[in-house]
Image: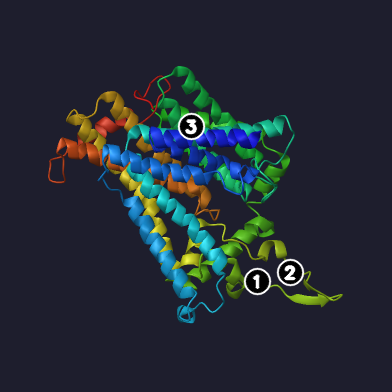
Amino acid sequence: MTVLVAYALVALFCGLAIVAHPGWAFVGYYLGAFLRPNELSLNLYGVPLAMPLAAAALVGSVLWWFRKGYPRERAIQPIILLVMLGHFYLSAVLLESALAPVFGHERPVDSAALWRKFDIYLKMFLVIVIGSKALQSENWVHRILTTVGTAGAFLGGWANYHYFVLKTYPITGPGPAIGLGGGIFADRNDFCMFLSMSIIICWYLAFLTKRWWMRMVWLGTMPFLLHAILLTESRGGLLGAAIAFLYIAWRSKRRKLMFVGVTVGLAVALLFFTSDSLMARYGTISDYEQDASALSRLNTWRTGWRIMWGNPLFGVGLENFLEVFYDYSDYQPTWILKEGVWQIRADFDYEAFQARQAHNMWIQRGGETGVLGVLILLWFVVSIPVDSRRVRRWLVELKDIGKLDEARFRHALLLAYCIEGTLIPYLVTGFFLSMEDFEGLYVLGLVTACLTAWCRHLRAEAGLSSGVKRAPKQQATTELSAVHRPRPRWSAGAGS
């Protein structure tokens, strides 16, 4: 029955995508991406739920472009991903060839793992290329962010339900037993990363809606998301959540009052809603030399740093970090033959010094793809706030010449701030996680590309170009400062 319901919903999104607008396939796809129904074995004859949605997005886009015309406005994010894919492909070909020793890579490459990871980035490239052309509208950016926020709010509520009703603890997310304690992500920290990003999205969605009761619903997700993060016992995730709430306070009109409220709220949450085991984990931060988790991160960072600089151009290959870990680590275990079985000698601290992923998105990317790979990833990440700030400047120009009314201007402006804010907890948490391939980052790239292309289209219609005199900088700053801080009594206007 569950499988039939799931496929009925997929069929609905596919039908809407083909008949009405290809954007509905993206809505269904991202619901599937973050709620992960595929991991619940919800598929028919081995075909995952994402496949019909991907096909519907492609077919719907072709039909839409045939009826409406192919959009010419460009965005930088698909170009960066194309460069990233080219670098990955060249790296893979060279590392699998006889030239591999020339680049310092003497260990055989795990080709199967490498190409599986390459397929993940290829998928995201196709998603952004198609989506950046099909979703060139501020309303579709709103819908995609609403989809992600809804998934985050659901997972936050799911975590609380399992804790209070089913007495499950700690929480890692719904799904089969795949990872730490079972869950939709490979690690509780990954789950926390998505929840902390959802805090920013849900906050801005509250001020992007016209209806007061929907605003209350979105704001009501805040305590559930925070408590869900506490239930995972993730220190990095809690740091990301704290940064998210501080960002909200910083962007608020009553900044000082919000900072006090956020500080008190986080203190109350830590004092009254934090488990003894989590507090014990916090207590080991200052004494990191006795904390196996902290030691393992420091050791993997040092090892990853050596791997990256030992292979600066192409790295050691996607998903090959563990393959070469002990070649660069100072902490190699001593194996002994005991009762006919090879075992690691007891005096080796396996928990702290075993081969692990880098626990840092930049070091992980650097080890697997070299310094050049890190620079390309940095280019993609930086392009998001750079384009978002450019969009905000363009919005002021378009409003000044009457191309945008007040409601639409405020709506698009808050979307830009939402994108920028959501990136911050991802980067903070990503400093402690190998999540350079996390779907959420590329969703932010997608909506940034869509919003940028939409603004380019409006500027082209208005006859604006680089040679046209822009609005005075002081005036633009005044306009932005008047609206960029969401207030509880203010409605953003044009919703989705």
Work out whether residue 250 can be spotted. no
Q: Which mark is residue 348?
A: 2
Q: Name the residue at the front extreme.
A: 45
Rendered image quadrant of residue 458: top left
Query: In the shown orientation, is residue 355 left or right of residue 335?
Result: left
Q: Quadrant of the N terminus?
A: top right
Secondary element under disc 1, as helix, strand or loop, is loop
Where is mark 3, residue-wise? 202
**Amino acid tagged 1:** Tyr
Q: Estimate the x, y position of residue 220 in percent, counting from the top left.
A: 54, 25
Query: CA separation, marks 3 and 1?
Result: 44 Å
Work out whether residue 487 can be spotted. yes
Q: Which mark is residue 244?
A: none
Above or below, 310 against 486 in this view is below
Q: Earlier in the sequence, mark 3 or mark 2?
A: 3
Q: Residues within 10 Å of mark 2 (few under 14, many from 20)?
A: some
Where is mark 1, residue-wise? 331
CB atoms at circles 1 and 2 under 8 Å apart?
A: yes
* Front in this rendered view, residue 38 or 86: 38
Q: Earlier in the sequence, mark 3 or mark 1?
A: 3
Give the residue displayed 42% in from the left and 40% down from the top: 421
Q: Estimate the x, y position of residue 407 in percent, counting from the top left.
A: 30, 24
Q: Residues within 10 Å of mark 3 (few under 14, many from 20)?
A: many
* Front in this rendered view, residue 229 or 320: 320
Q: Estimate the x, y position of residue 330 in percent, counting from the top left.
A: 62, 73
**Amino acid tagged 3:** Cys
